[in-house]
Image: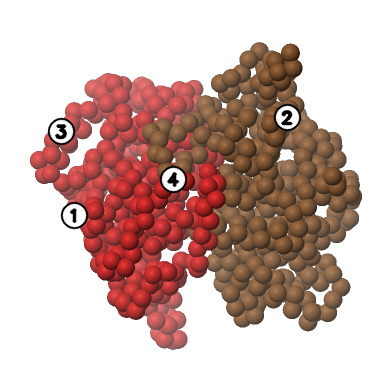
Chain colours: A brown, B red
Amino acid sequence: MAQPLLSVENLRVEFPTRHGTLVAIDDTSFHIDEGEILGVVGESGAGKSITGMSIIGLLDPPGRIAGGRIHLDGQRIDNLSYEQMRRIRGKKIGAIFQDPLTSLNPLYTIGRQLVETILTHSEMSRARARKRAVELLVEVGIPAAERRFDSYPHQFSGGMRQRVVIALALCANPRLIIADEPTTALDVSVQAQIIALLKTLSREHGTAVMLVTHDMGVIAETADRVAVMYAGRLAEIGPVQEVIQRPKHPYTVGLMGSIPTIGHRIERLIQIEGAMPRLTDIPTGCAFNPRCPKAFDRCRVERPELIPVETSEAACWLYDREREVARA
Amino acid sequence: MPEAAAAESGGGGKTARETARETARETDAPFVSVRGLAHYFDVSKPWLNRTLEGAPRLILKAVDGISFDIPRGKTFALVGESGCGKSTVARCVVGLYRPSAGTVRLDGIDMASLKSRREIMPLRRRLQMIFQDPYASLNPRWRVSAIIAEPIVAHRLMTDRKAIRARVDELLRQVGLTPEDGVKYPHEFSGGQRQRVSIARALASNPEFLVCDEPTSALDVSVQAQILNLMKDLQKELGLTYLLISHDLAVVYNFADEVGVMYLGRLVESGATEALFGAPRHPYTRMLLDAIPDLEMSGRARVPVAGEVPDPIDPPSGCTFHPRCPHADARCRREAPETITVDGIRLACHGIEEGRIAAVARGKA
């Protein structure tokens, strides 16, 4: 198998604070292939966005990568200088954030912002850059692109703005797009449009997408594989169908059950008792053990690593035991 | 302290509620009744611009004639895209906005008829609101116990400090927190816990009617499940009536008894949740349901909806949905549809009235 486009090995992200060092991401490994969409889900504070931010090298200080390696297209990118990383950002990695308004400069027309981004990353004449910008706007589905070229961000609706942000991310034909909650600020009807767009782009350009979201529905429709994060670690990773229909980790089971669906009305949603631990006091053993209905002694002492179960992997001792039983 | 004792039993002001129930039965009116509610915002340019530049007056019809009833102890939900006016309805119902037209009756009392503060206060006690953002709706400088005690103090329900404390402790327990949490400040809590504090505060005045504006939209799904379950338990326990504002159809489907779908300030379809979601009739309702991401991955092609909500200042003529509607014809563009009732579902659509559009049962794939 060819090497993956993005590989993250044993990533560890720390935030040194006055009260000691917080470990936001602990020993997390995964990869994304060319043209693949990896969904990353989890509650707020699980470390999804921080994972994305460490890949593009935009961790807010004092946060820092304290261990592990990140390779993009064969090149190690976690130890680059700010200037070197700046060149890779935009050119090889595009980013889409939740709120399109903060990603756009309100004082410049969208056309100018696109042209400047294109000129930053590639050598071409202004006229050609302009042509390319219009093409991009057409590609992301902005009607009358030529006419709207000189409009300001505030003249666009939320969905249209997010399209502009996607166009910006695509300027330099990046190999990887990190989309952090790209549809959260949008209405369902518009959400569907943006998701369809991301999917088409990934398929047509072979762009890898890391889609960070808390919305399982969006993942189900878009992603090829999904990674479930809990308290800074991967709880489960596998093909999207399998994780959704046959979740392995008890946390994933609870998470899936807590999502209300249309079609079978239930009196009470399944709820996971308690809340995710704060980073200051992550329980020993499996971080999920105090909330887990199936926890046993080993879970409270020993931290589980990802264990292959069927075609996915889960960090849960339940499956280790099963394997041993099977082997015996 | 009879108040506290009554509250302790969990049936907070049981006698008062029972008498209220009897009056309701006498008048035979629904507990909450909204008729022809409208709220217009004046978004014109300032007077000087209007005079010198001849800029016209601009009126934004955020809510344009909405009627619905909520029986006691039931949940009515309003759904729709952002900007459709659902939050404005909520604010009119609790009295934060004065309606431009129409009436809101709570237990038979027309809220607009109450003029003086003394008249309004007893009614205000009976309805409370829960807001979307638990970060913005709690005073960061107050301890949680003071936040929860505020309605008790404001409505002069209790004066004895010990009694108030006992009531606050009880409320904290009721929403799944501990009395020890009372001494903390809001920033010490997570989003879900803050929303529990908001609910405790809302319950402090023994209300009968809660208006919940996107109560779980800012929360994670697992926390959302906890809060929705809590709200359901409290409804059963205290006989609460809810008006739920939400953009999440799946939440509404699982939580509400009746639902109203709003589009550009009007109700396009409303009725019993199960019936409405089971066989959506109005093209807009169908469009919304089709747009929901499918967890079951039945292979149903998700239909990306064409277009967006039009500018409410300059809404389309006739049926305001016609530019996005696949079934629109000349009449739809010309004439606004009247509300009709089909099989207990109230809807406004020419196509359905003329029999051009048939209900489509949504089979579970």
Say how many tags the image has.
4
Numbered disc 2: secondary structure: strand
Q: Which residue is mark 3?
A: B19
Where the N terminus of chain A falls, by quadrant? top right
Residue type for callout 3: Thr
Where the C terminus of chain A falls, by quadrant? top right
**Picture coordinates of residue A309, whole percent (x, y):** 69, 29
Position above or below: A324 against A250: above
Is residue B142 toward the left or the right of residue B23 in the image?
Answer: right
Chain for mark 3? B
Residue type for callout 4: Lys
Disc number placed over residue B364 in the picture, else none: 4
Residue drawn at x 51%, y 34% is A257
Labels 4 and 2 positioned on one and the same chain: no
Q: CA distance from mark 3 to mark 2?
A: 62 Å
Position above or below: B22 against B347: above
Residue B125 seen in the figure: no
Between A208 and B95, the residue placed more toward the observer is A208
Disc number placed over residue A308 in the picture, else none: 2
